[in-house]
Image (tube, rainbow, N blue to C red):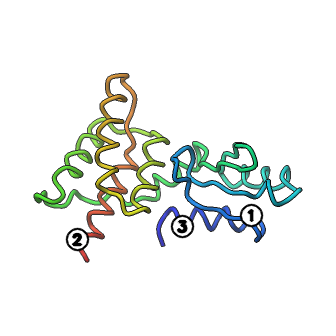
Amino acid sequence: MSAVEELRLKARAILTEGCFVRPDRSMRALFVTDYPARHRDTEEKSLRLSEAGFIVEQDGALWLLDLNDEAEAALEDRLPDLPMPPMTEKNAAMLSLCRMIMLHGGHDGEMLRRTLLRIEEGRADLLTEELNVMCAEKLRRHEPLSIGAARLMIMYLEEKKKC
């Protein structure tokens, strides 16, 4: 089970049936749900989601759910620190990106979220392009990059190698 699906099920367990909880395609958050449009006990559920490590943000009739800093750090800590696979023509762009992130790594929730969502979508090609731009911007501002994003990409490459 993917990390995104695991987190979605965690949120789903708190929210009742009768609403959707899906990855946020706009990348504003990890998930979006229509729970507040369908139910009245929003204060209690929002509190329970917060206690479970989610940030709940109102967006009209929807909630945007993202991980708080502690939950992001816990997720990054659970990701295996795999060795870099051998570079090939097919994985060179992503592996080069991973190496750069490892050199300047730290914690960055936005980069981690984008990596989780793009890999879940099966859009590693788009992920590589987007993260190259994000890395350049963050390095110019002397901000850390996400070690978790690099670990997720290495896991993705290892999984892809098995297929």
- Residue annotated with mark 2: 161
Rounded to the nearest angstrom, the CA distance separating label 3 from label 1 is 14 Å
Quadrant of the image for the C terminus?
A: bottom left
Residue furthest bottom in the image:
163
Specify the amino acid type for callout 2: Lys
The image quarter containing residue 160 is: bottom left
Q: Residue 155: where, in percent of width, then height?
A: 33, 62
Q: Residue 79: where, in percent of width, then height?
A: 42, 58
Specify the amino acid type for callout 1: Ile
Q: Residue 90: where, in percent of width, then height?
A: 15, 60
- Residue annotated with mark 3: 5
At mark 3, the secondary structure is: helix
Q: Earlier in the sequence, mark 2 or mark 1?
A: 1
Classed neighbour count for the residue bearing mark 2: other residues with Cα under 10 Å, few (<14), some (14–19), many (≥20): few
Classed neighbour count for the residue bearing mark 1: other residues with Cα under 10 Å, few (<14), some (14–19), many (≥20): few
Residue 85, above or below 47? below
Residue furthest top in the image:
141
Q: Residue 96: where, in percent of width, then height?
A: 19, 46
| Residue at figure coordinates x 30%, y 31% from the top left | 136
91 lies left or right of 40: left
The answer to whether the residue labelled 3 contacts the one labelled 1, judged by CB atoms less than 8 Å apart, is no
Rounded to the nearest angstrom, the CA distance separating label 2 from label 1 is 36 Å
At mark 2, the secondary structure is: helix
Residue 12, above or below 101? below
1 lies left or right of 13: left
Specify the amino acid type for callout 3: Glu
| Residue at figure coordinates x 70%, y 46% from the top left | 56
- Residue annotated with mark 1: 14
Residue 108, above or below 23? above
Rounded to the nearest angstrom, the CA distance separating label 2 from label 3 is 22 Å
